[in-house]
Amino acid sequence: MWYAGKLNKKGRIELGIDEPGILYGATIFTTLRVYADSLDDGRTNWQGHCDRLRSSIQTFGWQEPNWARIREGAEILQRDFPVLRITIFPDGREWIIGRYLPPDLEERQQQGIVAWLAKTAEFRRSLAEHKTGNYLTAWLALNEAKKHGAKEAILIDETGNWLETSTGNLWGWQDRRWWTPPLTERILPGLMRKQLIDWLKSQNQIVEEELWTEELVSGMEAIAYSNSVVEIVPIHTVIW
């Protein structure tokens, strides 16, 4: 891992007992997939991920991190890992860890997955417009989904409208056009979501950003979810 400007091979870091990142989940993060072994590959979207972090830092009034140091750590770790998670603490410290792609990713992309529909809005993420370290509700939802034999959880609002999954954004196909929940519903403005919208529109495809009511969902011919790591994965079955 990389922490506070140094490569760490011990697999552990020391944090103070008053660390707000531990006490309150006061961190922000972004997870990116490195394409062609390069942070500068357009699909990696390095600038987009940095802009996401910068936007949250400015919103929360946190200390600006050392962006050159973040880039240095990411460059080192991407030599061994295709996926990087970059975490920022309120005082500007950076913490970067690497991981591998899911071993069954190709199977998921080709055959789709089972998803579990959350029964309550309590699983909805707090500060959903940002990727904060307080991801407890999404983590709980994902673990509940696994108990039902599913690989993803679909989160809902107080009236039962579908919002997003525990790790990504929702997509649907109906009436010869694509559908995705709107950002006005306080969902994560996923970077892969934006890339897909821009690409689809460049191909003269229609993308509708509409509320996913039960009526709308019932007419979907296909649904999927997306994020920067898995790209887009079909959902062939939803457990209600």
Image (cartoon, rainbow, N blue to C red):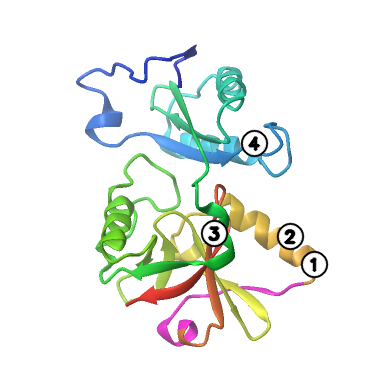
Give the residue type that dot 2 points to: Trp
- Asked if 36 appears above or below 148 in the picture, the reply is above
- Distance between the Cα atoms at labels 1 and 2? 6 Å
Q: Which mark lies nearer to you, 1 or 3?
A: 3
Q: Which residue is mark 4?
A: 46
List x then y, in percent, for residue 196: 66, 59
Q: Residue at x 67, y 54 (%)?
A: 195
Image height of 36 relative to 187, above or below: above
Residue tagged 1: 203
How far apart marks 2 and 4 lie (CA) works out to 18 Å
Q: Is residue 106 visible?
A: yes
11 left or right of 78 in image: left
Farthest top residue in view: 6
What quarter of the picture does the N terminus occupy? top left
Element type at mark 2: helix
Q: Earlier in the sequence, mark 2 or mark 3?
A: 3
Percent across and percent down for residue 88 are: 44, 29
Q: Which residue is mark 2?
A: 199
The magenta region covers 205-217
* Residue type at tag 1: Gln
Q: Amino acid at mark 4?
A: Trp
Residue 162 percent across, percent down from the top left: 41, 72
181 within the magenta span: no
In this image, 204 relative to 35: left or right? right
* Disc 4 to disc 3, C-alpha distance: 27 Å
Please tell me the numbered disc located at residue 107. Answer: 3
Asked whether the beta carbons under mark 1 and mark 2 sit within 8 Å of each other, the answer is yes
Determine whether 233 is above or below 221 in the image: above
- Mark 3 surroundings: few (<14), some (14-19) or many (≥20) residues within 10 A: few
